Structures are given as C-alpha cells and as structure tokens.
Amino acid sequence: MELSEIESGMSKYTDHNTHSISKKETSKKKDIEYLQFVEFTLGTEFFAINLFNTKEVITPTEITPLPSTPVYIRGVMDLRGTITTIVDLKILLQIPETEKGKKKSRIIILDSNPSEKPVGILVDDVYSVSTHHSSDIERDAEDVSHSNRFILGVIRQNKASGQKLVLWIDIQKIRDSIKSEL
C-alpha cells in the first residue's frame, strides 16, 4: 500500500469521524430542546419530575413505619430484597389530602448512585410519561420559584379541554434536603 493510499484512507476516516461528531453535537442540541418527564398528581395539582431521575413506578406494598423520623418519611419497604425509604411527597410539599389519591397511589422509585440509599416517592397517581419542548416550560416564573424552592418551572400543556399547568419539581434538590433524615 502506498503512502498516498494511507493518507487518503486516513482522510476518509477523519472526515467520517468529524461528520459523526457534528451529528452527535447536533443531536445533543436537539435533546436539550426536548425534555422527558414522569407526570403525576398530588391532591388536585399536577407535577412532573425528569424521567432520567426515575428508575421505575410501582404499586405500593406494605410500608413499615420508622420511629423518630419526620412525618413525611412514611417508612421503608422491601423492594426485591432492597430496603427502600418511602417519602410522602404530598406531606413534604404541604399539599392537602384528597380521597381520590388514596385509591390509585403509586411509588416512583428514584434513580440513585450506588453510594445513596434507595428512595421512593409516594404520589397520588402517575398519569403520563411525556416529552415537552423547552418553549413549553417557563423556568423564570419568579412567583413560583420564590414560593417553593423545589420548583424548577411550569410546563404549559395545551389540551382540547384547555390549558393545563404542570409544576416541574427538582427531585434532586428534595433528595439533597432530606438526605440527613434517610
């Protein structure tokens, strides 16, 4: 093989990789434009957390209460051999109890690092996994962010029945704030 053939082959390889990288960069920009959420209810309000902060959604089983813990920590449960702490998000966020929530409650198991204790959040119902364009999210809602430090923004959903507002929760900030209690 001659040197010119090697250089030609390298050139093709370099061009291919450069093209591949630019495709990845473009893809990352598109990913930033769209965010995926798990949407759920607490009381009569709608909430969402980033899909990539969740591991799974389960139906509640027996939760064992823990003594001397804050009221928002419901207790622990055995999830396939792993002791998982369950946090009642409605109590933590001070949302009034409704009868509707007791019938269809779910636990969203949060994704965690191996060094973190497994945590699940108790919610009234999980109704959707959805993708929203960043233009549908109001991140600078000062009245929301000042009144609740756990809110990242408000997602506007236009439905046939009208506009619905979904509060985007910073689940990592919640997790960090209760870490000492776990």
Image (tube, rainbow, N blue to C red):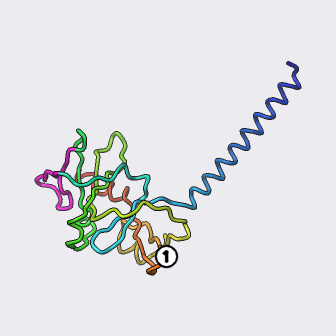
Q: Nearer the viewer, residue 178 or 133?
A: 133
Q: Nearer the viewer, residue 115 or 169?
A: 169
Q: Nearer the viewer, residue 11 or 81?
A: 81
| Amino acid type, label 1 | Asn
Which residue corresponds to the image point at 61% horizontal and 57% vertical from the top-left? 30
Q: Does 74 lie within the magenta span?
A: yes
| x, y percent for residue 152 | 43, 66
With respect to residue 131, does 135 lie above or below? below
Question: Magenta segment, principal secondary structure?
Answer: loop
Q: Residues within 10 Å of mark 1 (few under 14, many from 20)?
A: few
Assign the N terminus to one quadrant of the image.
Answer: top right
29 relative to 123 in the view: left or right: right
Give the total number of marks visible in the rendering: 1
Q: Is residue 174 magenta?
A: no
Question: In the rendered view, would you say 97 is above or below 129?
Answer: below
Q: What span is colored magenta in the figure?
A: 62-78
- Residue 101 position within the rendered picture, expressed as x and y whole percent measured from the top left: 24, 68
Left or right of residue 146: residue 5 = right
Label 1: element kind? strand
Q: Which percent across, then down, holds residue 116?
A: 32, 44
Residue drawn at point x = 73 percent, y = 44 percent: 19
Task: In the displayed orientation, state which residue is furthest to the left.
Answer: 67
Residue under label 1: 158
**Residue sitting at 68 percent across and 48 percent down?**
23
In the current view of this chain or complex, which residue is farthest to the top?
1
Is residue 97 in sight in this rendering? no
Whether residue 88 is visible to the viewer of this picture, yes or no, is: yes
